Image (spheres, rainbow, N blue to C red):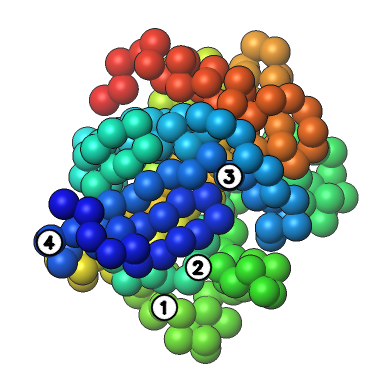
Amino acid sequence: MKKELLFDGNEKQVYATENPDLVIFRYKDVTVAYNNVKRARFPGKGILDNKISAILLDYLNCNGVETHFVGLLGDREQLCRKIEIIPLEVVFHNRMAGTLASKLGVPDGFKPGNIIVDLCYNNEELGDPLVNQDQAVALNLATYKELEEMFSIARRAGTLLTRLFHKAGIELVDAKLEFGRAADTGAIIISDEISPDTCRLWDEETGERLDKDCFRLDLCDVTEAYAKVLDKLNSITVK
């Protein structure tokens, strides 16, 4: 049963339940970019985010990568394990795109010979800056052991998601993963959503952007792009 509102964010809400170790995520139709500088509402977008994230998180759970996802509750809601937030983002890059490409002076979409994994401080007021492991520990955001585990999980999750999206005819360019300490076990697990809001996704045949860049760069309708992602994922066996 849904109880009090615990968090009201830009794109989703989190509610308490009767079980202290479980919460309900409710997805909104709002989209924000550039640290909330750009903002708009797209009817039905929250439903698409919820369903796509449920598929991806369940896929990771089924393949040995622990996440907060428990199950879908409806078009906009999912039941999740409660976590203590670790205010860091681990970003998995198969290609250099967006800010990373600009910063390093390479063409957007440059494909290196290796996989890049970045660590960012999840702090909107500071612009979510890149940090190294020593800085993260100095700020008491995580321990070295936790960071090692987060990087290991991110690489495993990135590999699995890359394989899944390829099966659906989509290239995973990059993915932002967030983590928390599970309230029930204390384990480090993937938290928050995995969706076109947190990944760059390109159609393998056409190169069409199927992610939040549609909104960031005014390329196409967000709901149409996200619906294509959901359709492609639904067309394959996800396990």
Please state which amino acid type lies under the numbered disc 2.
Leu
Amino acid type at circle 1 is Ala
Nearest the camera: 109 or 233?
A: 233
Amino acid carrying label 4: it is: Asn
- Furthest toward the left, the residue is 19
Mark 2 and mark 1 lie on one chain; the one further toward the N terminus is: 2
Q: Nearer the viewer, mark 2 or mark 3?
A: 3
Picture disc at residue 88: 2
In the picture shown, does residue 144 fall above or below 192?
A: below
Q: CA distance from mark 2 to mark 1?
A: 8 Å
- The local crowd at label 4, few if under 14, some if 14 to 19, many if 20 or more residues have their Cα within 10 Å, is few
Image position, residue 210 (x, y; %)? 62, 26
Q: How many marks?
A: 4
User: Alpha-carbon distance for marks 3 and 4?
Assistant: 28 Å
- Name the residue type under label 3: Val
N-terminal label among 3 and 1: 3
4 vs 2, front mark: 4
Mark 3 sits on what residue?
A: 30
Q: Residues within 10 Å of mark 2 (few under 14, many from 20)?
A: many
Give yes or no for contact between labels 2 and 1 (Cβ–Cβ under 8 Å). Answer: yes
Question: Label 4, on which residue?
Answer: 19
Q: Say if 134 sits above or below 21 in the image.
A: below
